[in-house]
Amino acid sequence: MKITLPWAVATSPPDTIRFESNPDWNYLDDPQDN
Amino acid sequence: MNTTVTTTQRPNIVFIEVDQHNPAVIGAYANTVVRTPNLDALAARGIVFDNNYCASPICVPSRMSMLTGQHPYKNEVWTNNNVLNSSLPTFAHSLGVAGYKTVQIGRMHFNGADQLHGFSERYVGDSNPNHFGAVKPTRKPSGDNLPGAWGPMRSSLELSGHGMNAAQVHDQAVVDRAVEFIDDYVAADNTEPFCLAIGTLLPHQPYVASKEDFDEYRGKVPPPKVTKAFEDETHPYLRWWKSHTGIEDVTDVEVERARTAYFAMVTRLDALLGTVFDALNRNGILNNTLIVYTADHGDQIGEHGLWWKQTFYEGAVKVPAIISWPAKLPQGVHIDRVTSQLDLNATMLDLAGAPALPLSVGRSLLPVMENPDTPDWDDVAFSEYCTRPNDPLHSPAGKSWQHRMVRKGDWKLIYYHGMPSQLFNLANDPDELVDLSSVSEYADVVKRLTDMVLDGWDPEWVNSKIRDSRKT
């Protein structure tokens, strides 16, 4: 989506601001005791 | 001190709202274990408010109250699913009117289609469950390698330790983008000031920190000061909450591991924010930038046998408030007056010369900063926690909660609708060990503070509104 209306050119399209968290970013080291 | 602000002196503003930072885990707030050199330096260059309270001890209502200067019962955002009415002005609208370029980077936890609420630009964004149309988180989301550890439940303590959580990845992206924004803005030689709102997810649970950070605190983090066995928990709400979230029998190993990770996450957060302060300094604009540091709520981190927030003990409802603007404001000052998150909103607008928000009840802190002993400041703060019936995370089946707290001077009263209140004298009992609500000697205090809580706030009205409130 591209915003072209002059009054809104400084507005970021809402679908560009979603941060897709990757499940692989959530983990515990194995093992925990070292 | 001359704090009159002319339009040519208007500061840039960096408003930092992190997630779930208990101010007791900051060096500048007298913690001698945690390492927070950047926040400590910010405090040394500014003013630390020691008794600042959030408007609700849960993310979305706290944040929407901060933005609008209105309490939840006024802006009707009580839960993490409620949508802020886009017709309500925020401090970003006001700063825009005053000629500021308003940019939001990272977390703000807006629900619904309006992801700007007065900001003209937004980058990076939140983690995806907070966005309209995204998949809602569940207790056991498939594909999540730390199932349930993001929520208020026992699994967040079981699945704690060293590793990685998405919050750190998100927050690295946030500060990288903030540094890029600052560099570009100065390079472009803009004449209009900017308001850069930075939102991080750290140090929210999961209590998982990178090994490098975790190892710094291994064996060094003390146990909670106030322990309370489940069988000694007498208040019906707190007893239900502990049982509902499965924390009746948290092990010593879990307590130490989760607290160690929390301290480590705070230090990581501090380092990330340091890159932003470095960028301001490198670009020569640090001294004329108003920096406000705060959080949406705290974290009990095991005190009183509690974790996360959703209560009105100090660990959950008190939030950091550090205000730095070396060009204009005093430096290295602690102020122990009672203040509210809503006051930070009004203060930023006041210092920026922006119009006050018409419906805000926030009060500019400028008179207190000029004279911390001023008799004209009312030492009062309110906070509110209300839930929807059938919210499986926060309400019992078929029921809902309406709680409200008032801090007035040394006193704190916590009103639980339909249940006994709690009363603490924080001057004599800062750890909130002795509930004085049923002591006849203090009946007049209970009456006076209860009247304050119920003045304009009707729990039955809240309950009727919250059932039909806008939500994602």
Image: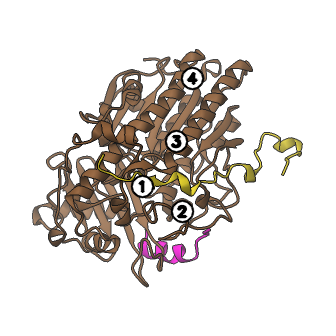
Q: Colour of chain A?
A: yellow
Q: Nearer the viewer, mark 2 or mark 1?
A: 1
Chain coloured brown in the rendered structure: B
**In terms of depth relative to the viewer, which is nearer, B308 or B207?**
B207
Q: Label 4's element?
A: helix
Q: What's the residue at 62%, 37% (across, down)?
A: B355
- The image's mark for residue B345 is 3
Is residue B471 on the magenta stretch? yes
Q: Which mark is residue B266?
A: none
Whether label 1 touches label 3, CB < 8 Å: no
Amino acid type, label 2 = Val
Mark 2 or 3, nearer chain start: 2
- Residue B206 circle label: 1
Span colored in magenta: B458-472
- Nearer to me, B439 or B273: B273
In the rendered image, residues at marks 3 and 4 fall on the same chain: yes
Q: Are discs 1 and 4 both within one chain?
A: yes
Is A32 covered by the magenta stretch?
no
| Residue for badge 4 | B279
Q: Chain of mark 1?
A: B
Asked which secondary structure carries label 2, the reply is: loop
Q: Which mark is residue B77?
A: 2
Give the class, few, some or many, for how many residues have Cα within 10 Å of label 3's Cα (few <14, many ≥20).
many
Whether pointer 2 and pointer 4 mark residues with C-beta atoms closer than 8 Å, the reply is no
Q: Nearer the viewer, mark 1 or mark 3?
A: 1
Residue B369 in the image, given as x and y percentages of width and height: 39, 28
